[in-house]
Amino acid sequence: MDLQNLGYALTQVAHNFGAVAVLGGSLGALWRSPQLESERVLGWLVCIGWAIQIASGSLFGAISFHYYGRFPDISGIAVMSLIIKVMCASGGFFLAALYLWRAAAWPVARRRRIWLTMSGLSAAALTAAAFLRWFS
Ligand code: HEM
């Protein structure tokens, strides 16, 4: 059993499902008619999804470092795409945590703005992910 490939593949599984959770959860909340109880369930899903993205994204780097003694040799556009992903994930996690903490006191319009922003952050991160494979 090749532990490096297995570790990488399992990390990618978590990373893929995390991506589905943040985009799907945010769009799902926008799509349904506003209702705080069910939105909070989606809030947890999305918050956990962002945390999974940060943890699994870091694990990719840790696995490379463990096996090769250095991080993957990326530059230029790929580095930019990674920075965008880290910013989206940190911002998204912050917004989701803030939502879970404060949303009960917020008007519907503010709740929808947060869901819209998290949808945008998810879409931006997914788009940036494609440019991680830009080698030059
Ligand atoms: C701290 C934040 C993040 C870090 C450090 C990170 C890191 C990475 C790394 C290193 C890879 C490359 C894996 C490989 O070798 O193929 C990757 C792939 C990927 N990431 Fe992230 N990621 C982060 C956040 C996100 C977010 C928020 C999303 C989407 C919502 C996302 C979606 C993807 C997708 C779809 C891939 C697969 C791309 C492909 O195979 O072409 N990532 N990520």
Image (cartoon, grey):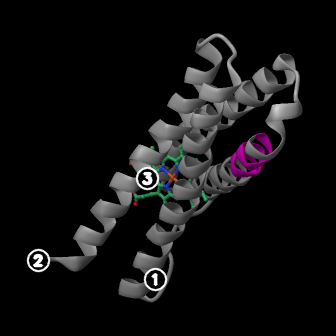
The CA distance from mark 2 to mark 3 is 22 Å
Give the prevailing secondary structure in the magenta stretch: helix
Point out residue 52 in the picture as x, y percentages from the top left corner.
Answer: 52, 57
Q: Report the magenta residues as a range.
A: 91-99
Amino acid type, callout 1: Phe
Disc 1 vs disc 3: Cβ atoms closer than 8 Å?
no
Name the kind of residue labelled 3 in the image. His
At numbered mark 2, what does the secondary structure look like: helix, strand or loop?
Answer: loop
**Can you say whether 121 is above or below 62 in the image?**
above
N-terminal label among 2 and 3:
2
Q: Is residue 92 magenta?
A: yes
Q: Which mark is residue 1?
A: 2
- Image x and y of residue 61, in percent: 49, 72
Which tag, 1 or 2, sits closer to the chain's start? 2
Q: Tell whether position 126 is magenta.
A: no
Residue at 59 percent across and 13 percent down: it is: 31
Image point (48%, 62%), residue name: 56
- Residue at the limit of the structure toward the left, as seen here: 1
Q: Which residue is mark 1?
A: 65
Disc number lying in front (1 or 2):
2
Name the N-terminal-most of marks 1 and 3: 3
At label 2, counting other C-alpha atoms closer than 10 Å, the crowd grade (few under 14, some 14-19, many 20 or more) is few
Q: Is residue 72 visible?
A: no
